[in-house]
Image: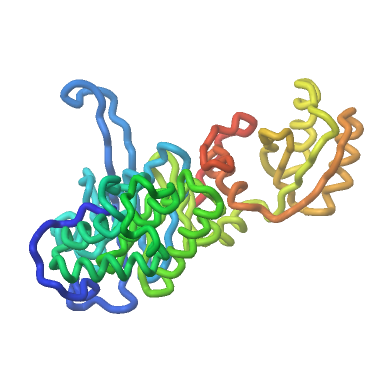
Amino acid sequence: MTEPSTTDTPDRDRTDTGSSDTGATQNALEIRGVRKVFTSGLLRRGRAVVAVGDLDLTIPAGTVHALLGPNGAGKTTTVRMVATLLRPDAGTVTVSGIDALREPDRAREIIGVSGQYAAVDGTLTGFENLRMVAQLYGHRRRDASVLARDMIAELGLDDAADRPMRTYSGGMRRRLDLAGALINHPRLVILDEPTTGLDPRGRRQIWDLIAAQVDAGTTVLLTTQYLEEADTLADEITVIDHGTIRAQGSADELKNSITPEILTVEFDGEPTASESAVVARTLAAIGVGNPHRSETGTWTVPVADGAADIPDAIRALDAGGTPVRSVSVAGPTLDDVFLQLTDHTINADGDTATNRETREPADVH
């Protein structure tokens, strides 16, 4: 949930907060030249680490924008600065026309935040948690109760509303945390890895809730390590690594920014180290990029001529003495984009690992 201002403000439609010239076409978020450096050691005299470096980002109202990157890429640092929980060392953050650095209290009134871990009190009921958040936003107790009940009904938690939060499943706790981020009807909702640790059904439920909010006009800034999540939800994706932007665009644009098709090869049995070296050289000669070996032993390489490259691949690999089980060609996925841009892969659990079979790719902007 968010950390709202505790200023006692009158009940009103919060979507009217902001500059008087706010219009339907105004950007929900504009980040310009934002930079954050952390320094280790006593008295901050140790090594300086650039968590976010001169970041520029624009998010139109009523859209979903995904920040995609490996662990330590700078995603959470970025969203904490947008949420006014962390002050940047340089740059500006504007939320629906409000300077979030100069007027953080005003910005917080139109921002909702759901962090990586559900920020709920296990001793309170779901209803009590939501009513408390609404009261922190300045709503009177009676109005806060109405908002809490309405949000609980919208998220389908009526049966559990009056049970202590400690009895909730992980998926239910995440849904309630999301409800806390939405209860003040914010213009911008920040979701920092909202489905981490959820099973596929729970993840799908959160996706449906996010989609419904966007249909109602809410803007969402989403950080995620789940490629399918970004592909499913985001209108635009920013790939970030080491605090800098590597690429931006829709999922289709990012896929089309790399070689149009990927050749995939599976072998009968696990190739030996010497055979793997031959496979790598062979695929490198056939393809137009670096070959990559997955954890399951499958090899992939970008190719220029698609299916026309399959016969050449089979002949070359057979000549090298490595039995081929299957060869196929398909369009690139976000995983291919992520691999090429960050030199990392992401497994089904959202964990990232450096790909040691490929060289560091060049920046793509």
> Is 140 placed above or below 273 here?
below
The residue sitting at 31% across, 63% down in the picture is 182
Q: How is the image coloured?
A: rainbow
Report the residue that reaches farthest toward the left.
8
Is 76 situated left or right of 318 in this image? Answer: left
Q: Residue 24, position in %: x, y? A: 32, 78
**Residue 104's image quarter?**
bottom left
Is 342 situated left or right of 116 in this image? Answer: right
**Residue 19's image quarter?**
bottom left
**Residue 257's image quarter?**
bottom right
Q: Is residue 201 visible?
A: yes
> Is 193 placed above or below 182 here?
above
The residue sitting at 40% across, 44% down in the picture is 244
Depth check: 157 or 258 in front? 157
Q: Residue 279, position in %: x, y? A: 78, 31
Is 364 situated left or right of 222 in this image? Answer: right
Is 137 situated left or right of 78 in this image? Answer: left
The residue sitting at 70% across, 55% down in the picture is 331
Q: Residue 359, position in %: x, y? A: 59, 33
> Is 144 placed above or below 55 here?
below
> Is 1 placed above or below 25 here?
above
The residue sitting at 89% across, 28% down in the picture is 321
Depth check: 208 or 308 in front? 208
Q: Residue 77, position in %: x, y? A: 32, 44
